[in-house]
Image: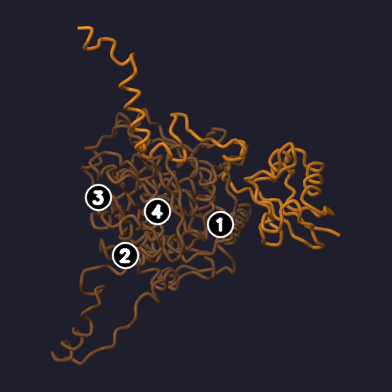
Amino acid sequence: MSTYELRCRECGKTWPSQPRNYCEDCFSPLEITYDYDSLRKTVSRELFASRAPNIWRYRELLPLPAGYQPSLPVGYTPLVSAPRLGEKIGSRRLCIKNDAVCLPTLSFKDRVVAVALANARSFGFDTVACSSTGNLANSVAAQAAREGFKAWIFIPSDLEPAKILGTQVFGAQLVRINGSYDHVNRLCSQIADERLSAGQGWGFVNVNLRPYYSEGSKTVGYEIAEQLGWRLPDNVVVPMAGGSLISKIKKAFDELVLLGLVDPRPVKFFGAQASGCSPISTAVKQYSTEIEPQRPKTIARSLAIGNPADGPYAIKAITKSGGWSEDVSDTEVVESIQLLAESEGVFTETAGGVTVGVARKLIHQDRILPDETTVLCITGNGLKTTDVLADAYQAETPIAPKLVEFEAYLASKVGKPAAFAGETPALPLARKSGLLAAEA
Amino acid sequence: MSITVQIPTPFRRLTAGTPKIDCTASNLNDLFAALDQQFPDLTPHLHDESGEARRFLNIYVNEEDIRFLGGASYAFRDGDEVLLVPSIAGGSNQLNPTHRKVRDEWGTRLDGRDRRRPGLCRLLLRYCLLRCCPLRSPLRSEDL
């Protein structure tokens, strides 16, 4: 375990480890800093590589209470090359960081919750809570059950049914709020506030435990570097909701360089949003450093945060790296989900569709070049958002179990290249939308 | 006419613990003036010198973000409940939004335009310049 403390991101004031997310003086957010000088002597590539494949292998670089014994193998998801997707969207060195199979609840949120709950116990909380667009709800509910916490989960009422069920099944207390995520989030900061003043504190993973929670996101960055053979990629494409993940992957890369574990290399950060909720990408495209809040209207509900808390830091990470941010329409999100599934066998949720769609756009704009190593962060599983594909496929008429029936069926399908000639249905759609015009 | 203003815990240190005030402000500027007078320590956290609300301060009127209601031009109605919530995001307020950076400190264009491959004209121009430039090679073949 390492030495760490809380530090104000604006005025630099420091605090010992405690459940607190803002600076008393300037009301700016806090983040964790470590004693990098002593870490440089203790950590090495070999040390990390000798441990079990999960996020705890990087335990020196995470804020964990002394003697903490993790009980769940979270993270260390596959980083796979994606040659077929790359061929279709125009990249020769494309990789997918597949957090659609992150344990225990199939999204990257398992990483952040694991680190937050590790601290919740040592701070003396017996109840944990969160405001969520779905994936965080699933993860807090599951890990709270596993670790023996009571869980209170606050969600917007219009969430996908699979994400609601996937929270209730773990026995968590679910509170549905009539309003958007931003309303839920505001309510939660009020509740955290009131309960704290009443002396019955709850550990809100993304309010008072936020500095610990967001450190969990760094493990995506460590894993990408390690899985590339302790090398940094040229480009990373990251979906953005609150804007925390992209700035934490940057922090992870910076730390690895600082500790001498990877060679310094300019990494460009690209942020992906859905057009129906794009406060961060809009700001980047207007060369602005400020977020103009939006009212979300998109099928990518896990990214539907109109007033992103870490928006300014996401903008900074993107523009300072020479990266860019783009957004895609709901139609493109669905097409991109299909494109990824048909070319790489990875079924992602709407946020992943946003990432793939934006990557395709950025390659088309020459912002990402074909021979650069590009990593797409796929952060959630498609089985949680199947409702968006409801209209994409028709139920086939069943046939009798007779060879003659199958012959007739086969004959009826000949001449339909989509199913039999190996051409994917997503491509004509993509051509129609003008994205693959150069290829056509 | 009267409105209620709720003060969140982080700010109460600057309001001597007052959690809530009633006032008769008719719009946001009036409200800031009233709060400035009553709690001068709070002023720098609410607005800048020109009276513009701090970007990291979220102001809600009856559950709705005031920016969606017209911001400073919104006229409060009797019984409105105003809630101040520091967004705890910070960072952007110190930067001047009118100054749009085109290049970062290493000279890379932030809009990525320098990443485009040079066109044919530019390549020809570069080639000609390199060929013609006497500085390129002080020793020429005819000198030998």
From the image, tell me which residue sits under label 4: A361
Alpha carbon distance from label 1 to label 3: 36 Å
Work out whether residue A428 or residue B106 is closer to the camera in this orientation and state it: A428
> Residue A232 appears at what percent x and percent y?
30, 39
| Camera-side mark, 2 or 1 | 2
Q: CA distance from mark 2 to mark 3?
A: 37 Å
Q: Nearer the viewer, residue A414 or B15?
A: A414
Among the chains pictured, the one given orange colouring is B
* Viewer can see residue A65: no
- Residue tagged 3: A53
First in residue order: circle 1 vs circle 3: 3
Whether A309 is drawn above or below B116: the answer is below
Q: Find disc 2 in the rendering and name its residue.
A: A427
* Residue type marked 3: Pro
Amino acid type at image mark 2: Leu
The residue at which mark 1 appears reads as A306
Instruction: Kindly report the distance in space between the C-alpha atoms of the residues bearing marks 1 and 4.
Output: 22 Å
Label of residue A179 in the image: none
Residue drawn 25% across the image and 50% down it: A53
Give the farthest residue toward the left. A403
**Amino acid at circle 1:** Gly
Q: Which chain is brown?
A: A
Q: Return the residue nearer the eye: A194 or A256.
A: A256
